């Protein structure tokens, strides 16, 4: 190897920088490719319904820890996080492929359990498993899931449609999945140091469930259809509200104001955060993995949301020049920070 | 964990047993899912063209060795092996997704190289990269590619259509990729033991190229269209002729006779096999990774193949009861053996 080759650690440019770099320069050659890299899923025009495709790669030791993750839950979650991306396009998932790389320590029964979870997710969300690849790995488990969905062209919601004045909404509550992970990590450390101590997880069931067995908001997409409501932009909350709203703003060419007091935090999550000496709003902004939907609507559509407790209006889209800002409870303005994907740091 | 749980090592049931086990019990719920697990790719009906999806997972240390695999070639091959599955359906690939898990030892420049190869494959085969996922791994590189193609319903060729009396054909020549791998592995061993010895690969260029930079038979699919020829069954040769023809026979409910003397082996491959003290026909039958097409045609379609050197008629489909048999040059009958995927052994 030549010694004067430039070497940049991946950490120097970050996830989004890396994706942008690696995917630039691909010329689109097929008219049927309506949407490629850059949204929750890609869109293919088949002259009938549009096909929507999304894919995720989950790596043991990075995305999950088998010490506290039941394999059935892992299988379920692997599917759900992909379906969540399809719903985030306002589309309906229809098919998935699942590929596995497994080390020799996995038994057939262990894989049966994993597939029980996959099967349950397929049943609950009415999707078909249509393919995959199964191979061995030198170390650890790798799961790759691709989800394929469909939608009519006028139904699709991208990340780039938010306009000044639009209301910013989220479903459910935020920060729970992150806090659940903190409990599991704490109990793992205690167990490794003192295997005889009983785990103390009795008041964290909700958060642990959010972490280990998240659900995708199929119900919300169904509600939109029934209510005749089409968001102007949408994505699912996987990296954290802060990072994700910045995506929407960047792609839509707008700014935003998020009101701290309106960000929905479950009461148990709130108390657990304090118990961990964390600021609950920090967990909600940067926690990630809640798989709730973040979307924007035109102000006149607010009534269509009704009094549904599923939805919180947490802010407003502003001019690009105003930046992406959090208005704290004490009425201070803080710039939002993208945490994104920190595996390489 | 309970101690009386049944544990079966994956090696005990093998790849195909594992796939069958894991994918059984999934009920099809969408009318649009025409074909799921069990062929080269899945088929989705969008009321217009059909969508064809295929996916592969490539793991460092299992599928490739970075000691002798240039990253650009690896990127190219990762795409091509998936496109090959789409062509094997008699369909046209249109889009791919690529997901990566990378350890911290990979630099941005290394990934640039990998993507140069991916980009070149996209250009040569006219497909669009439409998505993916990039994450870190604790160790080694994992590449997951999903290819999406399209076809009219009456164009698709499955593995289950072979009928008694059909002619069995292959494209190109076989065994080269396997022999290329043997050369690379030998040189790696020599290099590790005696780093000062110059590698001796001068007469193995063809085979090394077959291993490191295979091509998918896009040209053959185009030829079929032009010649008005639709095979009765088809798949691509990834596991090896022996294993792959057994797939076709099993799914079609038929037997076969393969004539050893008709199996196409390149002259260089032939001599290299002998140099390695291997039987050339064994390399051709069990080598795998040639990514040629294996297909069956009705006898009356033989003339449509013309005098094209691309094609070899290597045998005939028989009744199921006659089994899957190799007729040797000395006219002996040997049962064909599926080698398949041996990573777990």
Image: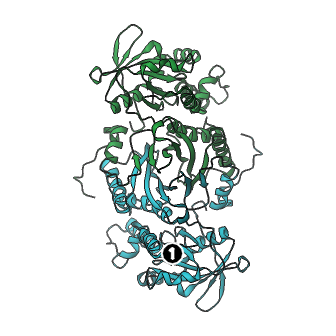
Chain colours: A green, B cyan
Q: Residues within 10 Å of mark 1 (few under 14, many from 20)?
A: some
Q: Residue at x 24, y 54 (%)?
A: A3
Q: Position of residue A146 (x, y in %)?
A: 52, 47
Q: Position of residue A222 (x, y in %)?
A: 58, 31
Q: Residue at x 50, y 66 (%)?
A: B90
Q: Nearer the viewer, residue A276 or B189?
A: A276
Quarter occupied by the C terminus of chain B: bottom right
Q: Position of residue B169 (x, y in %)?
A: 53, 78
Q: Is residue A193 above or below residue B326?
A: above
Q: Nearer the viewer, residue A46 or B23?
A: A46
- Look at the image and tell me whether residue B335 can be seen: yes
Q: Nearer the viewer, residue A256 or B270?
A: A256
Q: Is residue B298 above or below residue B184?
A: below
Q: Residue at x 58, y 90 (%)?
A: B329
Q: Residue furthest right?
A: B4
Q: Is residue B156 above or below residue B103?
A: below
Quarter occupied by the N terminus of chain B: top right
Number of dots carrying numbers = 1
Q: Position of residue B63 (x, y in %)?
A: 48, 60
Q: Is residue B76 left or right of residue A200?
A: left
Q: Residue furthest bottom?
A: B330
Tell me the subunit letter for badge 1: B
Q: Residue furthest top?
A: A330
- Look at the image and tell me whether residue B55 can be seen: no
Q: Residue at x 57, y 52 (%)?
A: A103
Q: Nearer the viewer, residue B39 or B175?
A: B39
| Residue on which the image places disc 1 | B229
Dot 1 lies on which element? Answer: loop
């Amino acid at each position: 190897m030549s010694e004067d080759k430039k070497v940049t650690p991946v950490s120097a440019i970050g996830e989004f920088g890396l994706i942008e770099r690696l995917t630039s320069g691909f010329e689109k050659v097929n008219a049927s490719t309506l949407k490629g890299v850059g949204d929750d899923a890609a869109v293919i025009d088949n002259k009938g319904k549009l096909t929507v495709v999304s894919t995720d790669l989950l790596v043991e030791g990075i995305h999950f820890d088998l010490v506290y993750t039941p394999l059935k839950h892992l299988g379920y979650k692997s599917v759900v996080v992909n379906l969540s991306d399809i719903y985030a396009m306002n589309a309906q998932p229809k098919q998935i492929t699942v590929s596995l790389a497994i080390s020799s320590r996995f038994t057939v029964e262990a894989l049966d359990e994993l597939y029980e979870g996959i099967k349950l997710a397929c049943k609950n969300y009415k999707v078909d498993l249509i393919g995959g690849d199964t191979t061995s790995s030198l170390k650890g488990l790798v799961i790759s899931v691709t989800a394929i969905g469909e939608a009519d062209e006028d139904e699709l919601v991208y990340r780039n449609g938010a306009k000044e004045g639009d209301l910013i909404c989220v479903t459910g509550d935020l920060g729970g999945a992150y806090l659940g992970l903190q409990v599991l990590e704490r109990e793992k450390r205690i167990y490794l140091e003192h295997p005889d101590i009983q785990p103390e997880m009795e008041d964290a069931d909700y958060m642990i469930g959010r972490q280990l067995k998240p659900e995708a908001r199929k119900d919300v997409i169904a509600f939109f259809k029934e209510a005749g409501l089409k968001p102007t932009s949408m994505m699912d909350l996987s990296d954290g509200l802060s990072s994700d709203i910045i995506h929407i703003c960047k792609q839509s060419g707008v700014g935003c104001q998020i009101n701290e007091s309106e960000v929905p935090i479950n009461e148990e999550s709130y108390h657990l955060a304090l118990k961990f000496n964390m600021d609950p709003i920090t967990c909600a902004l940067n926690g990630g993995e809640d798989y709730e939907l973040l979307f924007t609507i035109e102000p006149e559509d607010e009534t269509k949301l009704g009094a549904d407790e599923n939805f919180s209006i947490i802010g407003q889209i502003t001019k690009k020049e105003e930046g992406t800002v959090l208005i704290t409870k004490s009425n201070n303005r803080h710039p939002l920070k993208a945490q994104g994907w920190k595996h390489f740091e």
